[in-house]
Each structure stands twice: as C-alpha cells, then as structure tokens.
C-alpha cells in the first residue's frame, strides 16, 4: 500500500525519498500541513512539482469524513472512510472542559460482547497508528478553530488486541503536540497481558476496565473474553498498572436491568475495587437490539447509592447524543443498511 504520512514520525517524514534534494525546512512544512489535515492540493506553500511527487507516492490522510451527524447537545457522530473503503465511527463529545473524541482502533472487533454492536461481525482488520491519528486530525479540521482536548479509545475495536499500533498512535499524538498521554483514556475488556505490557512500557494514559459484572460466572454470559481472563487476574494487572503509572483506574460498568444491579453485585464490585484507587463509572446501557435492557433513572441512582454506602467512588456517566445513536457501532450499521440513504454530509 502507499505510504501514509500520518503513520510517520517527524524524522521519517524528513527522510522521504520525495524530499531528497529539497531544503531542510520543507520537511517541517510538510509535517505541519499533514498534522493540520491539509490535502496536498492545498499545500500551496510547497512547490507544485514536489506536491505532485508526494501525491504520486503517498497519502496525506488515512481517513475522510464520509458522514457527520450533529445532536443538539453538541455531540457529533462521524463515519470515517478509510483508504480501502472500510468504515469506522468516531464520536466528538462536548463537555464543560472541552472536546473529547472517541476513536476507533479496529474495523470490527474480535471480542463479541453481547451488548456491543461493534463486534457483531467479528474483526475485519486492525487500524494503523496513522489511521487513528487521521481520525483525530479530521475531527480537529471539522471543528475549525476549536481543538480536541481529550481522546478516549472507546470506539470500535479492542485497543489491547492491536497493541503495537495503538501505542504508536499514543506516542505520535504526544510527539505531534496534539494530545498528551494524561489526556488519553484507553478502555479494555480486560486483556491482562496488554495491561501489564502498558505498565512495563511506561505509559501513563488513564486505564479503563470494562467489567460490567463483578462475578466471573455472570460476566462470561455477556463477555466471551471472561472465559480466559478472570476478574481477579484483571484486577491484579490493573493494580500493577496503577503502581507503575500512579494513575487511578476507571472501572466501566454498564447497568443492565435484572442482571447486575443487585445488592450482591454492589458488594462484590466494591470488594474488587477497594485495594487501590479505582473510580467506578456507571454507564446507562445503550440499546443495540441485544435483548439486554438498560435500567431506568431510578434504578441507576439506587445502584449508585448502594456503592456509595459501601465507600466507593462512583458516578453515573452522562449520556450524550442519544438522538443520533451515538453508541457503539450503531451509525455504521444503519449507514450500511442504508436507512440513512445516500452519502450526503
Ligand atoms: N474494547 C474496549 C473499548 C471499546 S468499547 C472495551 O471493551 O473497553 C467502549 C466501552 O463501551 C466499553 O466499556 C464497552 O463495554 C462499552 N459498551 C459497548 N456497548 C455498549 C452499550 N450497548 N451500552 C453501553 N456501553 C457499551
């Protein structure tokens, strides 16, 4: 495949064959334009012959916005088209402290969680680091003068199942001065080897664990990975990450009616999370035709109170972008099922 410039570090861009014989400042010019999301045709400060040569050999972006849908609360859902035509989703959320982009790390997903729409068709392929970076660059360009301030790796895919590319992406983002590690959250369904590797490799991103149940035998009913990765091992690996990185761990827990919001669930969840700094993020389940039901507001608050009474640090995640189906693989499914009609922006 053609070279994707967002896959390259500054030094690798400087070493491009197309730049041979050019003055040294050309590399910096090119690099600045690439991380700003400017297409070759608009890099008018570069000589036309150089632009043509670059366009022959490389791509400046690994993703384009195929469609965007905006909600009243400021949430924007993107459908990105990759160079091979595959589609992935990204969600831009608006918080008081700024803009957060939810980035996809794979096309599809191997993990097949029962409640998640992203993994319904299994894994199609990994994204490269440059493709993930292109999601961010596209979102920044979409925003105009505003900038994305936080990145959460919570789109389609399991980040730790694509370890090398995801960690390269995290390094590229901070090297480019776009997003520092402390503004990045990586969410995993609990691949313990990857969690330990992250710790050993010296990362300091916020680690989020998708638990959704505090009992292995219940968890395996909704998350096939629970067969291999037991909760006690996941929490051991998370503790190890906390000890190495100093970062508090976030536990994600999607509340499901009649399944995981009882007294025993609260007690066991508290027990699992009380040995090192953990914050529990209760998530209202997004409906994805899975047959699993979310909880009403009352039931959610009751469960939060149970955890608080046990001494847990806990919040209910605010739900954004409901009316545009902001959740987990929904836009892509609708788009490919053609319910939105043609590809207008
Ligand atoms: N594979 C990673 C990251 C992607 S999913 C992981 O499992 O963490 C990001 C988060 O959204 C996870 O916590 C996931 O369990 C959750 N999620 C998936 N489908 C959901 C749904 N229908 N409602 C609420 N949360 C969901």
Image (spheres, rainbow, N blue to C red):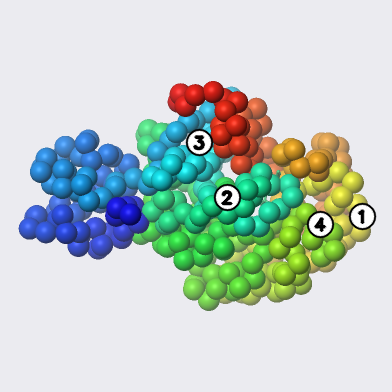
User: In the drawing, what numbered circle is on residue 78?
Assistant: 3
In the rendered image, the vertical position of residue 198 relative to residue 39, given as above or below: below
Q: Earlier in the sequence, mark 3 or mark 2?
A: 3
Q: Distance between the residues labelled 3 and 1?
A: 39 Å
Decide which of 58, 194 is in the foreground and name it: 58
What is the crowding at mark 1: few (fewer than 14 residues within 10 Å), some, or many (at least 20)? few
Q: Earlier in the sequence, mark 3 or mark 1?
A: 3
User: In the drawing, what numbered circle is on residue 108?
Assistant: 2
Q: Tell me what residue is drawn at x 14 percent, y 55 percent.
A: 19
**Mark 4 or 1, closer to the camera:** 4
Tell whether 156 sits left or right of 212. left
Q: Which of marks 1 and 2 is nearer the N terminus?
A: 2
Q: Earlier in the sequence, mark 4 or mark 3?
A: 3
What is the crowding at mark 4: few (fewer than 14 residues within 10 Å), some, or many (at least 20)? some
User: In the drawing, what numbered circle is on residue 221?
Assistant: 4
Decide which of 166, 225 is in the foreground and name it: 225
What is the tally of numbered marks visible in this picture? 4
Quadrant in the picture for the C terminus: top left
Quadrant in the picture for the N terminus: bottom left
Q: How far apart are marks 4 and 3 (CA)?
A: 31 Å
Q: Which of marks 4 and 2 is nearer the N terminus?
A: 2
Location of residue 335 in the rendering, given as x and y in whole percent from the top left corner: 56, 32
């Amino acid at each position: 495949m053609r070279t994707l410039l967002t896959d390259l570090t500054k030094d690798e861009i400087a070493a491009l064959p197309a730049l041979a014989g050019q003055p040294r400042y050309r590399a910096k010019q090119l690099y600045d334009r690439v991380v700003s999301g400017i297409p070759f045709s608009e890099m008018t400060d570069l000589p036309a012959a150089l632009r043509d040569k670059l366009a022959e050999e490389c791509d400046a972006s690994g993703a384009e916005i195929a469609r965007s849908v905006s909600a009243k609360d400021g949430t924007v859902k993107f459908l990105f088209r990759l160079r091979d035509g595959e589609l992935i989703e990204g969600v831009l959320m608006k918080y008081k402290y700024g803009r957060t982009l939810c980035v996809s790390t794979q096309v599809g997903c191997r993990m097949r969680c029962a409640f998640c729409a992203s993994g319904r068709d299994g894994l199609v392929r990994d994204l490269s680091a440059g493709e993930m970076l292109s999601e961010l660059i596209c979102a920044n360009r979409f925003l105009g003068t505003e900038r994305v301030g936080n990145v959460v790796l919570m789109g389609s895919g399991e980040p730790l199942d694509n370890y090398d590319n995801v960690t390269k992406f995290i390094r590229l983002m901070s090297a480019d001065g776009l997003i520092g590690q402390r503004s990045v959250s990586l969410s995993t369904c609990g691949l313990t080897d990857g969690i330990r590797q992250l710790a050993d490799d010296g990362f300091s991103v916020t680690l989020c664990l998708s638990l959704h149940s505090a009992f292995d035998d219940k968890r395996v009913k909704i998350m096939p990975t629970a067969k291999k990765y037991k909760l006690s091992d996941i929490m051991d690996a998370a503790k190890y990450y906390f000890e190495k990185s100093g970062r508090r761990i976030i536990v994600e827990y999607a509340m499901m009616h009649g399944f995981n919001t009882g007294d025993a669930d609260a007690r066991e969840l508290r027990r699992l999370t009380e040995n090192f700094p953990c914050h529990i993020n209760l998530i209202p389940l997004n409906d994805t035709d899975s047959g699993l039901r979310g909880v009403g507001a009352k039931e959610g608050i009751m469960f939060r109170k149970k955890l608080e009474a046990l001494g847990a640090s806990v919040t209910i995640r605010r739900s954004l972008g409901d009316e545009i189906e902001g959740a987990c693989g929904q836009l892509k499914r609708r788009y490919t099922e053609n319910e939105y009609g043609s590809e207008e922006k």
